[in-house]
Amino acid sequence: MPSRTPSAPAPADSAACTTNNDYKYAATNLGDTYTITFCIGATTGGPKSLQEVIPRLPKNLPCGVLLIQHMLPLFTASFAERMNEISQIEVREAKEGDIVKPGLVLISPGGFHLTVR
């Protein structure tokens, strides 16, 4: 079970993953502010559950979302397109150089690890 004790703040110019109340998030220092990013991981049963959760996220969600779905590489792009069609928030498959920003869900491409810098 994840720890419920928040980690220390991330040092300047870095990103850190931590857990708080069973949510995983990355805090990235952008000058004097931090951008919070929620990370969601799913496997069997994930697509059905995510089709219930992601469309309920508001378009103006004040954080970015990283979604890692255990899925074959050929299916993540079409899954991202479908999620985008039924959601208020923008959803797309992550690609090299994407910036995690509020109001955006990035889905990790199948067969790849997602790294945040």
Image (cartoon, rainbow, N blue to C red):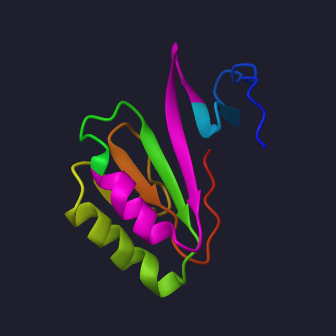
Q: Position of residue 6 (x, y in %)?
A: 72, 23
* Left or right: 8 in relation to 100: right
Q: State the count of labels.
A: 0
- Which residue occupies the foreground of this view, 100 or 107? 107
* Left or right: 58 in relation to 2: left
- Residue at 24 percent across and 41 percent down: it is 59
Quarter of the image with the N terminus is top right
Q: Can residue 93 be seen at all in this image of the molecule?
A: no
Quadrant of the rendered image containing residue 16: top right
* 82 in magenta: no
Q: Is residue 100 above or below residue 33?
A: below
- Residue at 31 percent across and 65 percent down: it is 83
Q: Position of residue 79 (x, y in %)?
A: 37, 74
Q: Position of residue 35 (x, y in %)?
A: 49, 28
Give the magenta-colored segment's residue range.
Answer: 28-55
- Which residue occupies the foreground of this view, 46 or 76? 46
* 40 in magenta: yes
- Which residue occupies the foreground of this view, 68 or 95? 68
Q: Is residue 84 above or below residue 3?
A: below
Quarter of the image with the C terminus is top right
- Residue at 21 percent across and 65 percent down: it is 85
* Left or right: 46 in relation to 63: right
Q: Can residue 86 be seen at all in this image of the molecule?
A: yes
Q: Position of residue 111 (x, y in %)?
A: 61, 78
- Residue at 41 percent across and 69 percent down: it is 48
- Which residue occupies the foreground of this view, 45 or 62? 45
